[in-house]
Amino acid sequence: MNVVGMGVLPSPDKYSEVVKDFGNLVEPVIQTLVQTGKMERLEQEVHELRGEVTTLRAEVEKLTSLVSSLMATNDPPLVQQRPQSPYQPVCSQKPRQQAPRQSISQNQVP
């Protein structure tokens, strides 16, 4: 199946036109960013963020190593379970109350 022939991608002879058009669209945006000083701020922010990512990666590696070493030890668990109470809980259901039965003898008329 040819994706180019389906109109999804431009034909090879049209690539240069697409790249040129894209450049024409992006160039004014970059010029505006440079003129307003925003480009320098963006570059500085990218630099700072890369530093933070590097630091975070190092910290994640340390934590991964720590967790691995903790899991490898045969020490008892860090969280202690509460001891079971020797007393059993009392049933919380109320017993059914039955209506009092009245016996009617055969000789009595109600």
Image (tube, rainbow, N blue to C red):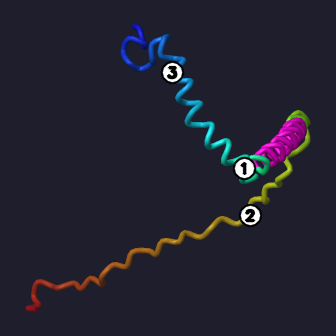
Q: Residue placed at 40% from the left, 7% from the top? A: 1
The magenta stretch spans residue 66: yes
Looking at the image, the residue that sits furthest to the top is: 1
Secondary structure, mark 3, is helix
Q: Nearer the viewer, residue 74 or 89?
A: 74
Q: Mark 2 — residue?
A: 85
Q: Nearer the viewer, residue 23 or 49?
A: 23
Q: Mark 1 — residue?
A: 35
Whether pointer 3 and pointer 1 mark residues with C-beta atoms closer than 8 Å, the reply is: no
**Span colored in magenta:** 42-67
Left or right placement of residue 27 versus residue 82 in this view:
left
- Dot placed on the residue nearer the N-terminal end, 2 or 3: 3
Q: CA distance from mark 2 to mark 3?
A: 80 Å
Q: Mark 3 — residue?
A: 17
Quadrant of the drawing holding the C terminus = bottom left
Residue 32 higher or lower than 104, as above or below? above
Neighbor class of circle 2 (other Cα within 10 Å; few <14, some 14-19, many 20+) is few
Secondary structure, mark 1, is helix
Q: Nearer the viewer, residue 45 or 86?
A: 45
Viewer-nearest of labels 2 and 3?
Answer: 3
Residue 37: % across, % down: 76, 52
Q: Residue placed at 62% from the left, 67% from the top? A: 89
Q: Residue placed at 11% from the left, 90% from the top? A: 108
- Note whether residue 86 is visible: yes
Viewer-nearest of labels 2 and 1?
Answer: 1
- Note whether residue 71 is visible: no
